[in-house]
Image (cartoon, helix red, strand yellow):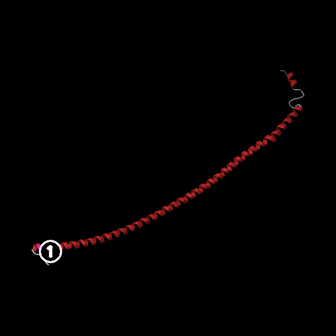
Amino acid sequence: MTLAQNSTIFDMDLGPLNPVTAELILGVVLFALTFLILAKGILPKINRTLAQREDAIAGGEDRADGLRAQAAAIREQYEAELAEARHEAARIRSQATEEGAAAIAAARAEGTREREAILAAGTTAIAAERESAERELNQDVEAWARALAGRIVGEPVGADRA
């Protein structure tokens, strides 16, 4: 294509700085129409969606902070209850130890009393049996002594004489 042919495409009196008025008006109308469609239809939806996302993110963070605070409060309460339960368990152990020591002391005292009673009864029974055995032996010894003395002397001695 030559320069002469190019000049027919562009009219010499119209250049890039002197556009065709009809094209310029059509371009401005189409631009305004596109701008109105974007400004009135699409951009509000985009802004609404962005605002919803931002609220969801901010609300999620607020809910997460609230849940963290609630979890911390529940944990503190749990730890306080656990500490109280440990204190109560220590108190119960201490009380059980004291009661056990008292029960052992009472059982020991009861055992000592029973032992003393058994020893006293045994001592009394042994003394009674000893006296009984001594009486029986004394009676037998006297009879044997008389019998032996009678053999030695050759005649009955003591009660056997009568």
Type of amino acid at the residue the image marks with label 1: Arg
Q: Which residues are magenta?
A: 145-150
Seen from the viewer's position, the closer of residues 108 and 26 is: 108
Q: How many marks?
A: 1
Main secondary structure along the magenta-highlighted residues: helix
Residue drawn at (23%, 73%) of the image: 135
Residue lying farthest to the top in this orientation = 1
Residue 32 vs residue 119: left or right?
A: right
Task: Say which quarter of the image contains residue 49.
Answer: top right
Q: Position of residue 143 (x, y in %)?
A: 17, 73
Residue drawn at (50%, 62%) of the image: 92
Above or below: residue 104 compared with residue 50? below
Task: Say which quarter of the image contains residue 53.
Answer: top right
Q: Residues within 10 Å of mark 1 (few under 14, many from 20)?
A: some
Residue drawn at (43%, 65%) of the image: 103
**Dot 1: element:** helix
Q: Position of residue 27 (x, y in %)?
A: 85, 34
Magenta region includes residue 4: no
Task: Say which quarter of the image contains residue 29.
Answer: top right
Above or below: residue 27 compared with residue 153? above
Q: Which residue is mark 1?
A: 146
Q: Which image quarter holds the C terminus?
A: bottom left
Residue 101 vs residue 135: left or right?
A: right
Residue 127 vs residue 4: left or right?
A: left
Residue drawn at (67%, 50%) of the image: 63
Residue lying farthest to the front in this orientation = 162
Q: Position of residue 3 (x, y in %)?
A: 85, 22
Residue 153 vs residue 82: left or right?
A: left
